[in-house]
Image (cartoon, rainbow, N blue to C red):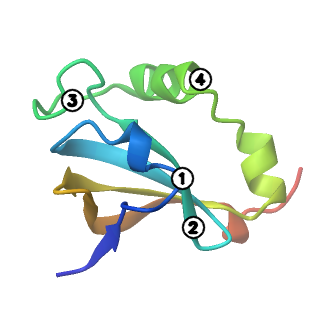
Amino acid sequence: MNHINLTNTKVEGQYKGAGHAFLVMEDGAPTKLIYENPEYPAVSIELSDDELMEIFINNEVDFEVLERKQAVILMGTCSCYQFAFPEVFIDFKDETLA
């Protein structure tokens, strides 16, 4: 199974249990864990584009900084202090600075 261990990383304290989430990766290391449903992580919800953007804003995700750092945002599922089935959500390495 494809997964990223969250123990002994910067995001270990952000882990709230099982649930769908986004993981910010900078220089190959996790730096921020953002749950799709922060109040009830294990309960999945459908998010509109506006709601998704609000989650990133509320979690102080600065897209310009991530772009400069050529970071990656993954989406996947948290379980047992692992980020499982990661898929690329945004790859700032492939973006060009405006």
- 32 and 66: which one is in front? 32
Which residue is labeled 3 in the image? 46
Which amino acid, mark 4? Ile
* Residue under the point 37% across and 60% down: 6
* Amino acid type indicated by mark 1: Lys
Which mark lies nearer to you, 3 or 4?
A: 4
- CA gap between label 3 and label 2 equals 27 Å
Q: Nearer the viewer, mark 1 or mark 4?
A: 1
Give the mark toward the camera: 1 or 3: 1
**Vertical arrangement, residue 91 with respect to residue 16, above or below:** below
- Choose the circle earlier in sequence order: 4 or 2: 2
Indicate which disc residue 57 carries: 4
Mark 3 or mark 2, earlier in chain: 2
Task: Confirm or deny contact between disc 2 and disc 1 (CB under 8 A).
Answer: yes
What whole-number distance in Å separates the C-alpha atoms at marks 3 and 4? Answer: 18 Å
Spatial distance from mark 4 to mark 2, Cα to Cα?
Answer: 21 Å
Residue lying at 19% horizontally and 41% vertically, measured from the top left? 17
- The span from disc 1 to disc 3 (Cα, nearest Å) is 27 Å
Q: Residue at x 63, y 27 (%)?
A: 60
Q: How many marks?
A: 4
Mark toward the start of the polypeptide (1 vs 4): 1
Which label lies toward us, 4 or 2?
2
Q: Which tag, 2 or 1, sits closer to the chain's start?
A: 1
